[in-house]
Amino acid sequence: MAVRIKRVYKDAARADGYRILVDRLWPRGMTKEKARVDKWLKEVAPSGALRKWFNHDPDKWKEFCAKYRAELKGSAAFGELLAEIKQHKSVTLLFGARDEEHNDAVALQQFIGARAG
C-alpha cells in the first residue's frame, strides 16, 4: 500500500491511484472536474481553530502535528481514511496549501506511516 501526497492544483496522473482530498475547505478556484477527487474527507482535516492557529507557520509545525494527532485520536474520520487506504493499492492524499512541506496531508502521511510501522 502506497500513500502519496500531492497538491490538488497539480495535474492528476494514473500513478495517483485513489485520490482523497483531506482539506476542510474546497480548493479555491478548482473545479470538481479538474480536481479529479475520488473522495473528499473534510472531517479528517484539522479543526478550524487549529488550522487558523497554525496558519502554515513552519515554526509551529511540531506543535501543530502533536495537536492534530490528538484531534485525530479515536476520530471516526481518521478510521474512515485508514479503511479507504486499505481498500486501494495506491492512494494520494490531496491538499491545497502552497507550502508542500508543512500541511495536513504531510502530517497525515506521517501518522499513517507511524501506524503501519
Image (spheres, helix red, strand yellow):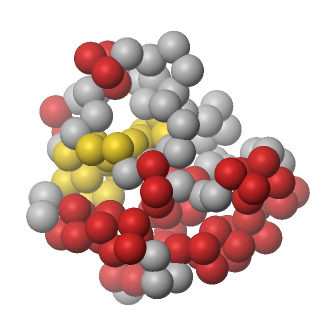
Q: Is residue 58 visible?
A: no
**Residue at 63% of width from left, 79% of height from top?**
70
Percent of width and height locating residue 85: 24, 63
Q: Along the line of sight, which residue is nearer the eye, 52 or 98?
A: 52
Q: Along the line of sight, which residue is nearer the eye, 76 or 85?
A: 76
The image quadrant that residue 21 belongs to is: top left
Percent of width and height locating residue 36: 26, 27
Image vertical order of residue 91 relative to residue 96, above or below:
below
Image vertical order of residue 50 relative to residue 82, above or below:
above
Percent of width and height locating residue 115: 40, 83
Q: Quadrant of the N terminus?
A: bottom left
**Residue at 62% of width from left, 49% of height from top?**
103
**Residue at 79% of width from left, 70% of height from top?**
63
**Residue at 61% of width from left, 36% of height from top?**
97
Q: Along the line of sight, which residue is nearer the eye, 88 or 28?
A: 28
Residue farthest to the right, as pictured: 59
How many numbered circles are shown? 0
Q: Along the line of sight, which residue is nearer the eye, 98 or 53?
A: 53
Percent of width and height locating residue 62: 76, 69
Q: Is residue 97 visible?
A: yes
